[in-house]
Amino acid sequence: MENPVAFDLNRAIQLWRENLASSPSFCGENLDELAAHLRDSVATLQAHGLSVDEAFLVASRRIGTVSSLESEFAKVNQKSLWLDRGLWILIAVQLWKIIGAVSALAMALAVAAAMGVNELLPSFGLQPISDAPIQWGVSLIASPLVIAILAGLGWRYLAWPREWFSGVFRPLLRRPSTLALVLFLTGITLSAGAGWLLVYWVYPILYHQNLAGGYFPWRNLAIQLPGCMILAALTFSVARRRLRLSPA
Amino acid sequence: MLTKELVAASTVPLVLSVLTRGESYGYELIQQVRELSAGKIEWTEGMLYPVLHWMEGEGMIESEWREAETGRKRKYYRLKKEGRKILQEEKQRWLTVHETLTKLWKTQSHLT
């Protein structure tokens, strides 16, 4: 019976290649070489009388399963594997800083909400909530751990974070300077901004502490800047090396 | 069929020996070994490439991407001086094993 959808060999090889490309064990050149092999193998099998889709099936089976190829190539591509791991560690460190800053912003929002509630309560003839439960509540809501758990749940049950990750973030891995710059700017703006917000707004209300007196407004920026710069420079250099080894 | 261990041990001398006939690319290397062994030496095709890359890293062979007459690009491998040296050593080892076994089997003909 004639296949209603014509088999497209180029498309099949491209899909097969993309499937392998998701593993850091292969560099772009490895994939080119394997794809060239697959084409040769398909051509030989076709010459022996197989149809193109049959030839592709047999050829891709003969070349080996993804997991077996992965484990063999990983042995010779150790360096690019370590660069890949290193890059993800650097990204994770910077994301953790960003999560920390987001927690400070959440704290500010929670304080604003608590204040709003406390202003409304007397008009209903109720006593305003005292400081201690607010302090506890705010710190709990704004704990980086809680935010990380919420982010994890969002990742698990919502579609858009994953779409954003594969559509926006993953392509950034191929552009080291943009990646480093985006992480640097997000990190520095959020962490310096969050520090400023905490000192000038949250702590004075929450703990009745006025730290702002004698507090150099740009101190947070000055403290965060060297660390963020070092992380950005490392991210740039690791991402660039990784890209050179695996332009996949 | 060869055992997994024997396949692993014989890949390097086989590749080096085939390349003494002139440069070649992965698919052709596999085909040549299959034909020469009458189908008894069957490699999992993709596994040859990591070995080739390792051999290149060790300086036994060198490679170059070139366009074939069909217009398709292929990576060709060529033997280097170091590779010839290693092939000589490998040859000695395999011949030693071969000769010893042959002598033993000649005197113990019931085994063959």
Image (cartoon, coloured by chain):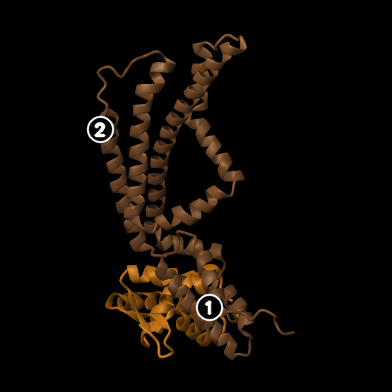
Chain colours: A brown, B orange
For the N terminus of chain A, the quadrant is bottom right
Instruction: Identify the secondary structure beneath mark 2.
Output: helix
The amino acid type found where label 2 is placed reads Ala
Task: Judge from the rendering whether residue B37 lies leftward or rightward of residue A94; answer left or right.
Answer: right
The amino acid type found where label 1 is placed reads Asn
Give the residue at x 41% y 74%: B12
Mark 1 or mark 2, which has the lower sequence index?
Answer: 1
Depth check, front residue: A173 or B64: A173
Kindly identify which chain the residue marked by label 2 belongs to. Answer: A
Q: Identify the residue position indicated by label 1 in the image.
A: A10
Q: Which mark is residue A222?
A: 2
Kindly identify which chain the residue marked by label 1 belongs to. Answer: A
Instruction: State which quadrant residue A125 falls in.
Output: top right
Depth check, front residue: A197 or B107: A197
Task: Judge from the rendering whether residue B110 lies leftward or rightward of residue A219; answer left or right.
Answer: right
Q: Which mark is residue A104?
A: none
Instruction: Identify the secondary structure beneath mark 1.
Output: helix
Q: Position of residue B51 (x, y in %)?
A: 42, 70
Give the residue at x 52% y 15%: A119
Whether labels 1 and 2 belong to a single chain: the reply is yes
Q: Position of residue A244 (x, y in %)?
A: 33, 62
Vertical placement of residue A104 versus A10, above or below: above
